[in-house]
């Protein structure tokens, strides 16, 4: 199978790292019209706790020829949606499901990636300078790996949490060793109760979870109990399902949309989209290696 959809977003110190399922590359991207995006990085520059920064209400979109009148009005507000800083290597065999930055005890940054496909799902720690895989751990073949995110627990321990697709089962790992420390169960939207994407809001000490529906679920960091949920709506007011990989950025929950190269960033309180990005020009579909899928 070749490259698939965009399905990985990770907020770094001065860029957003983006890749897709089975992509042979990752991109470091900037969003010039989002001036507060990197303003509130926490531990050693990793943007893990930026929920209290003021949100810029400007909605940014990329509009195709023949777009709606409303879309053209948004286009007039901003024409530059993103800029590519650098293209870097990525393992083209990785069916990327989760991507985040984290750090070790000395403050050195790492990239954490979880991959999918039953029997091929892995948890990986990647060097952000060389993009070489430093450590890779297979997960049990009964599980289809999905989203993951780095966080620190109540005792300050560095952890990685991962959810799985259809087994209603998640795992917590030591972020330094990738040793599995805990297994837990969860529910999302009935009847499937699937797990798709997960990200972490350090300011609220809660995880935010997607399951392919229009719902985002908010879990307490320490108990993993569901606190609330919201439905996501687009700038034009329509409900948006197929919410996939997530990244918490500057007070917003940024969501990949499955089967597309769109990223929408929503307010966690209301679920309303306030920023929308068409990323299809990042690596156009007709240029991707055969079977390359969408941004994820």
Image: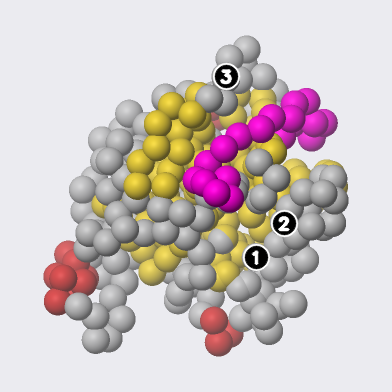
Q: Secondary structure at mark 2?
A: loop
Q: Measured from the top left, where is residue 135 in percent x and y?
A: 83, 44
Which residue has dot 3 on it? 222
Which residue has dot 2 on it? 116
Q: Nearer the viewer, residue 288 or 47?
A: 288
Which residue has dot 1 on it? 21
Q: Which residues are magenta?
A: 171-193
Q: Nearer the viewer, residue 222 or 54?
A: 222
Q: Residues within 10 Å of mark 3 (few under 14, many from 20)?
A: few
Q: Are marks 1 and 2 in contact (CB under 8 Å)?
A: yes
Q: Measured from the top left, where is residue 142 in percent x and y?
A: 82, 49
**Left or right: 215 as drawn, with respect to 113:** left
Which residue sits at x=67%, y=80%? 291
Q: CA distance from mark 2 to mark 3?
A: 26 Å
Is label 1 or label 2 in front? 2
Residue 30, quarter of the rendered image: bottom left
Residue 106 sits above or below residue 26 on the image:
above
Q: Earlier in the sequence, mark 3 or mark 1?
A: 1
Q: Measured from the top left, where is residue 156 in percent x and y?
A: 62, 16
Which residue sits at x=46%, y=54%? 213
Q: CA distance from mark 3 to mark 1?
A: 30 Å
Which residue sits at x=28%, y=76%? 63
Q: Is residue 181 magenta?
A: yes
Q: Is residue 199 magenta?
A: no
């Amino acid at each position: 199978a070749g490259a698939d959809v965009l399905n990985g977003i990770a907020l770094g110190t001065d860029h957003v790292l983006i890749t897709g399922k089975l992509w042979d590359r990752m991109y470091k991207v900037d969003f010039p019209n989002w001036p507060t995006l990197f303003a509130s990085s926490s531990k050693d520059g990793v943007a893990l706790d930026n929920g209290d920064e003021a949100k810029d209400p400007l909605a940014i979109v990329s509009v195709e020829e023949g777009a709606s009148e409303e879309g053209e009005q948004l286009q007039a507000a901003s024409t530059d949606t993103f800029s590519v800083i650098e293209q870097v290597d990525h393992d083209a065999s990785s069916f990327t499901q989760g991507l985040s930055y984290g750090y070790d005890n000395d403050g050195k940054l790492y990239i954490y990636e979880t991959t999918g496909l039953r029997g091929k799902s892995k948890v990986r720690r990647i060097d952000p300078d060389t993009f070489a895989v430093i450590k890779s751990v297979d997960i049990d073949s009964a599980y289809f790996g999905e989203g993951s995110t780095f966080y620190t627990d109540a005792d300050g321990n560095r952890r990685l949490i991962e959810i799985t697709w259809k087994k209603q089962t998640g795992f917590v790992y030591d972020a330094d060793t990738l040793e599995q420390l805990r297994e837990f169960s969860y529910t999302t939207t009935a009847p499937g109760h699937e797990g798709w994407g997960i990200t972490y809001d350090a300011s609220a000490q809660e995880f935010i979870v997607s399951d392919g529906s229009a719902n985002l679920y908010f879990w307490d960091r320490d108990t993993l109990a569901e606190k609330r949920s919201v439905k996501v709506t687009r700038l034009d007011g329509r409900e948006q399902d197929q919410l996939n990989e997530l990244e918490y950025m500057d007070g917003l929950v940024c969501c990949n949309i499955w089967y597309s190269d769109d990223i929408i960033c929503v307010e966690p309180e209301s679920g309303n989209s306030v920023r929308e990005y068409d990323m299809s020009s990042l690596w156009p579909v007709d240029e991707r290696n055969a079977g390359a899928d969408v941004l994820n």
